[in-house]
Image (cartoon, rainbow, N blue to C red):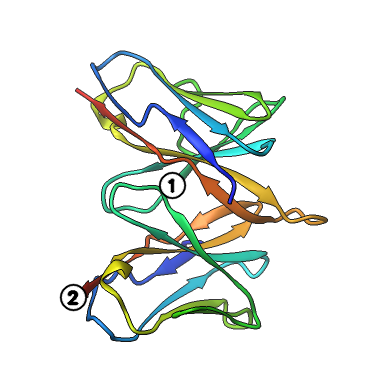
Amino acid sequence: GAVVSQHPSRVICKSGTSVKIECRSLDFQATTMFWYRQFPKQSLMLMATSNEGSKATYEQGVEKDKFLINHASLTLSTLTVTSAHPEDSSFYICSAPLGLAGTSSYNEQFFGPGTRLTVL
Amino acid sequence: RKEVEQDPGPFNVPEGATVAFNCTYSNSASQSFFWYRQDCRKEPKLLMSVYSSGNEDGRFTAQLNRASQYISLLIRDSKLSDSATYLCVVNRNQFYFGTGTSLTVIP
């Protein structure tokens, strides 16, 4: 299957600092990427949809000024957690979907390996 | 009402057992359906897509009932390596995840 990389895999930072997470599709172009957050023992929650060439679409309750998304190219999306606080500690996962030809639905999505953020 | 609902379990079954997971989705306009597997502290990995005609991959069988808005996953002859969380995922412009069902296969 397609490969999505994510960097860094783990970050420990002090409260108030900003953290940038990169998501790359390595062998296909992704005009759309999804950013998820997963707290312990909970399912993945969609934070935002990253769109190449346009602004990201944020889910209700997700602060766009705190979680900055930039879809710089067809293979790279970045999520910056600004002024991180301990409650932002979580597992952040990106994914790149493959569209089902001729429809608006997706055939599958490929996940990055995730970034575990710990804010002290 | 949640987009996707799953019984969180946990399911603790002996090796060799057959176990079934169920999932319901709320929006009849949902377009595609999947089962993902997630190991502890790892990203989800696609287990199989789910079709109305039903599909089978080795010990795994998935079924979709659009009329009842119901998805199932059957695992036969459980192995220790099947221990994981199984996520029901529904696509309708974006992907909606169930909370996952935890399975532990016991020796």
Q: Nearer the viewer, residue B43 or B87?
A: B43
Residue A49, x across and y down, in percent: 59, 37
Q: Position of residue A31 (x, y in %)?
A: 69, 35
Please report, as a chain letter, where disc 1 is located: A
For residue A116, what is the image quadrant? top left
Q: Position of residue B15 (x, y in %)?
A: 24, 81
SS for callout 2 = strand
Residue that mark 1 sits on: A45
The answer to whether mark 1 and mark 2 are in CB contact below 8 A is: no
Few, some or many C-alpha atoms within 10 Å of disc 2 (few <14, some 14-19, many ≥20)?
some
- Residue B53, located in which quarter of the rendered image? bottom right
Dot 1 alpha-carbon crowd within 10 angstroms: few under 14, some 14 to 19, many 20 or more? some
What residue is drawn where x is 44% and y is 80%?
B59
Q: Nearer the viewer, mark 1 or mark 2?
A: 2
Q: Left or right? Give the position of A62 relative to A41.
A: right
**Which residue is drawn at the image coordinates 63% and 79% (left, top)?**
B66
Q: Disc 1 to disc 2, how far (Cα)?
A: 30 Å
The residue under label 2 is B106
Location of residue B19 with respect to A92 vertically, above or below: below
Q: Amino acid at mark 2?
A: Ile
Q: Choose between A59 and B7: the one closer to the eye.
A: B7
**Residue A18 on image: x %, y %:** 37, 15
Residue at the (30%, 67%) spot, across then down: B81
